Amino acid sequence: MTKTVDPWGSGEIKIDDAFLKKFGLQKFSGEHAELGGKFFERNLLACHRDFDVFYKALLTKKRAVQLTGIASSGSLHLGHKLDLDFFLFFKSLGAESHLAICDIDGYVSRPDAKIPSLSKAKEWSANNTAHALALGIEKKEIYVQSQKPARYYEFAFELSKKMTENTFRGIYGHLDLGKLAANFLQYADILHYQLDEFGGPCPTLTGIGVEQDPHARATRDFVRRLPYKLFLPSFAFFYHQSGLQEGKKMSASEPDTAIFLDDSADAIKRKIQRAFSGGRESLELHRKHGGNPDVDKSYEILRLHHPDTALVKQVYSEYKSGQMTTGELKKITIEFLTEFLAKHQQRVEKNKTTAEKIVHGN
Amino acid sequence: MTKTVDPWGSGEIKIDDAFLKKFGLQKFSGEHAELGGKFFERNLLACHRDFDVFYKALLTKKRAVQLTGIASSGSLHLGHKLDLDFFLFFKSLGAESHLAICDIDGYVSRPDAKIPSLSKAKEWSANNTAHALALGIEKKEIYVQSQKPARYYEFAFELSKKMTENTFRGIYGHLDLGKLAANFLQYADILHYQLDEFGGPCPTLTGIGVEQDPHARATRDFVRRLPYKLFLPSFAFFYHQSGLQEGKKMSASEPDTAIFLDDSADAIKRKIQRAFSGGRESLELHRKHGGNPDVDKSYEILRLHHPDTALVKQVYSEYKSGQMTTGELKKITIEFLTEFLAKHQQRVEKNKTTAEKIVHGN
């Protein structure tokens, strides 16, 4: 990880002890792992920053707020679903949960070629909100940036006084004014539930990718400089779902790298069939030496998304031994995704009216 | 005027035809002067940018919005009163009038040493609002930035996408993030009454100092780049009231340069007695050659603020001829200010509760 990071770019980051030490990050412990769920069972979390403060509040049933956000700039893909699964997991453990639908952010941080107007961002907001509702997030847990009370915006502006141009450029390597503005909203998203007007100071958790740590540190730096006594926000870092091609990140900007939650059965089939696999050059070699599930994109989808941990483990060992072929692994993945997304898309349809109401504030 | 301007600094600008041509500014015409009032009678307006669009709407009784703002960062002085007199004049001519009390702006654009917190800015907001009410601006004509509906903030963020770092730096010569944020609120202040949610497109007028023209041009540039059909805002430029010392601007940052609307009779007397005068070195020379009202600070106060144009003219000629001494001119000025401000301060007291309600939104 270089000092300058573009959170909108892609890039793989190697997490080792030296990396953790350098950035003051911590590993999750065996005690944390007792929380269970796929994130701990399947080692989907890379590390954390100050998780224990939040964890302790959660265990002792004190107010513990989690917040995550979706920039309204396109269809959601499996990578977004993973963020929301994380959110749903901590919701199930009793966290006060807030999902930000970031319509203003989505518009100002994306080029006009992608999001030409606020109304386009709001279309995506309604789409994304319907998907979030379909995944099990409740109406009361969702807010849209453009529907917040004035105090929220006032706070975002307040933060602008607490960062210098050089700090910003040091963290992000640029000074695009739209992205700058979007960042101040993001800082406000993470911190505002600690203001008296929104419930008061308490530990908070936000799940993000490791490459977003500069964001996390900037947000914590604000807390030290604000005239309020807030808790330093905690962050859990997960590994991003990688793209369907080798060395790619799953990204809405490159549609073929991703399975979208809107994808049809045909699209799923086509994309998985073309996805990078860990199979051998021939069936004979595959049977003899086994496949490599650790680089296989279909296996990654099962590991990150299939609800049955036992099945995922079984697929891993059978594929690794060569007992399961790449074709069979892809078939399982296609069937799983097709069935899951068909049902999900039905729930999305049912939630569209509610989503519109949330986005347009009535 | 250099290309790079600091609207928070001070500086004298020479207005001549070459200057007007270079920046595409226009002189007010004889037809405009028929509007009357001290601004036209006493030549207090330097020039304008696109005034005719607004003027035509005003004459034909179409919706014509005027907007001005006060950054909540200290006591108001006579220079602010001049801005508000301009505002009251166009209100009397039938303009839809909005005065922005800029609490967020005041906090984020000023150093912590001056405005250490938002609550301090809000104290100044309440003070400034009480003064505005006392001068004759109505409650319904005043809004406080932090009390606006979400659409206003959304619009300010929207604007952030329409300016580049280089443009901003080219106009303002810096990239202080707090001042940057304050600027986006100012652009929104000037433009938002043309959004459908706030009344729809119409000509608007804002009175500012000539050194603020880069602000004006930036605001007009946005209009060309926004996905809305708005009128280009019009601007009238007045000469700023100069400071009480030679070569100074009347500035709240340097209290001895200014008469504040909060000043006591003693303070007024002391400041006027020490103010720079256009008198001669001796009474004998003064009687012989006459004084110079054009550089005299007491005369400037009468010219800008005394309600009686005939009296102002008389003072000018008597002082210039040497018939009136500097002591006599200062006495007239002290008496005028003392009486005016005593009555004004009584009205301020009566309006304090209303002002608090406006600032805190109840």
Image (tube, coloured by chain):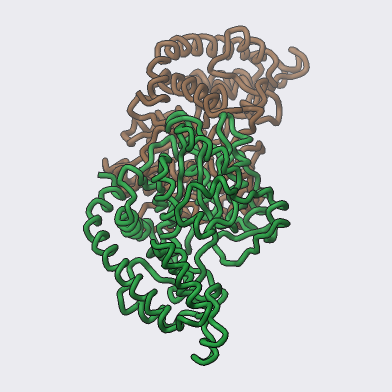
Chain colours: A brown, B green
Q: Relative to residue A255, is residue B186 drawn left or right?
A: left
Residue closer to the observer: B76 or A303: B76
Q: Relative to residue A276, is residue B6 drawn left or right?
A: left
Is residue B254 depicted above or below A221 in this figure? below
Residue A19 seen from this side: no
The residue positioned farthest toward the right in the image shown: A281
Residue at screen point 55% across, 41% down: B233
- Please identify the quadrant where the C terminus of chain A is shown: top left
Is residue A148 depicted above or below B43 in this figure? above
Tell me residue B296's x, y (percent). 51, 76
Q: Which quarter of the figure has residue B298?
A: bottom left
Tell me residue B62's x, y (percent). 46, 32
Residue B304 seen from this side: yes
Residue closer to the observer: A252 or B64: B64
Residue closer to the observer: B182 or A161: B182
Residue at screen point 39% across, 43% down: A152
Tell me residue A196's x, y (percent). 30, 48
Q: Which quarter of the figure has residue A90?
A: top left
Residue at screen point 35% across, 79% down: B269
